[in-house]
Every structure is written in structure tokens, then in C-alpha cells.
């Protein structure tokens, strides 16, 4: 339980760092790719039932990933990810940026 609490705190702090555009997290393509790998792993773990991040943190990560798409190094960073990581990131971003359905 102690490790789960620590994981929650660390992932919340990571979201804060990404949100503040910390250069160690999003400074260049390599750092951005590393950050995206961590976020991908966290989202995958939570989806598999592991209690490593709060639902609110996962939602923040998804929103941040959507915003990171406009980062100058985003395309290069995305290309550095594995296919599985790209899939997780794509699914997370799609959930945030999917257009609303308008029904008549």
C-alpha cells in the first residue's frame, strides 16, 4: 500500500512537471519521448487494474498528451516510441480530442 501511495504522489508530480513545461520532461524530443513512455506505462498499468495513479491524474495525463501534440518535438518524440506505446498514447489522445457527436 505504501508503494501505491508513493506512485500516486510521483505521478501527480510528473503531471505537474509536464504541465509547467519542465525542460527535463519536455525539453527536446528525447526527453519528451521518455516522458511519453512513462505516461504510457502508467496509463497501461491503470487500465490493467494496478493502483499506481488516481483517475484524476490519468485524466490530466490524457489532456497533457493532447496538448503536447503541438510541441515542436512531438512528432519526432512519437516516432521514438514503440508501437505499443504509440497505441496507448493514440488511444489516450483520441479520447480527449474526439469531436462531439451532434445528433439531430
Image: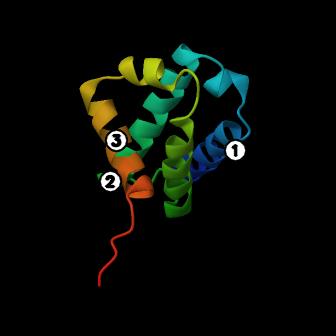
The percent position of residue 101, horizontal first and vertical second, equals 33, 71
Q: Earlier in the sequence, mark 2 or mark 3?
A: 2
Using the image as rendered, state which of residue 66 and residue 5 is in the foreground.
66
**Which quarter of the rendering shows the C terminus?**
bottom left
Q: Tag 3, which secondary structure?
A: helix
Q: Residue 100 vs residue 32: left or right?
A: left
The percent position of residue 89, horizontal first and vertical second, equals 38, 39
Q: Say the numbered circle drawn on residue 40.
A: none
**Residue 45 visible to the viewer:** no
Q: Residue drawn 50% across and 45% down? A: 66
Q: CA distance from mark 3 to mark 1?
A: 21 Å
Of circles 2 and 3, the one toward us is 3
Q: Residue 57 vs residue 101: left or right?
A: right
Q: Residue 40 vs residue 15: left or right?
A: left
Q: Say the numbered circle drawn on residue 16.
A: 1
Using the image as rendered, state which of residue 82 and residue 6 is in the foreground.
82
Q: Say the numbered circle drawn on residue 47.
A: 2
Q: CA distance from mark 2 to mark 3?
A: 15 Å
Residue position for label 3: 90
Q: Tag 1, which secondary structure?
A: helix
Q: Earlier in the sequence, mark 2 or mark 1?
A: 1
Q: Residue 83 vs residue 12: left or right?
A: left
Q: Earlier in the sequence, mark 3 or mark 1?
A: 1
Q: Residue drawn 65% across and 37% down? A: 18
The percent position of residue 32, horizontal first and vertical second, equals 55, 24
Of circles 2 and 1, the one toward us is 1
Amino acid at each position: 500500500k505504501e508503494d501505491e501511495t508513493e506512485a500516486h504522489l510521483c505521478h501527480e508530480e510528473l503531471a505537474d512537471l509536464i504541465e509547467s513545461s519542465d525542460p527535463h520532461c519536455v525539453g527536446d524530443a528525447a526527453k519528451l519521448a521518455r516522458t511519453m513512455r512513462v505516461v504510457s506505462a502508467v496509463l497501461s498499468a491503470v487500465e490493467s487494474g494496478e493502483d499506481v495513479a488516481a483517475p484524476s491524474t490519468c485524466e490530466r495525463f490524457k489532456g497533457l498528451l493532447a496538448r503536447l501534440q503541438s510541441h515542436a518535438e512531438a512528432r519526432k518524440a512519437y516516432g521514438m516510441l514503440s508501437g505499443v506505446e504509440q497505441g496507448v498514447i493514440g488511444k489516450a489522445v483520441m479520447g480527449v480530442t474526439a469531436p462531439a457527436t451532434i445528433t439531430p
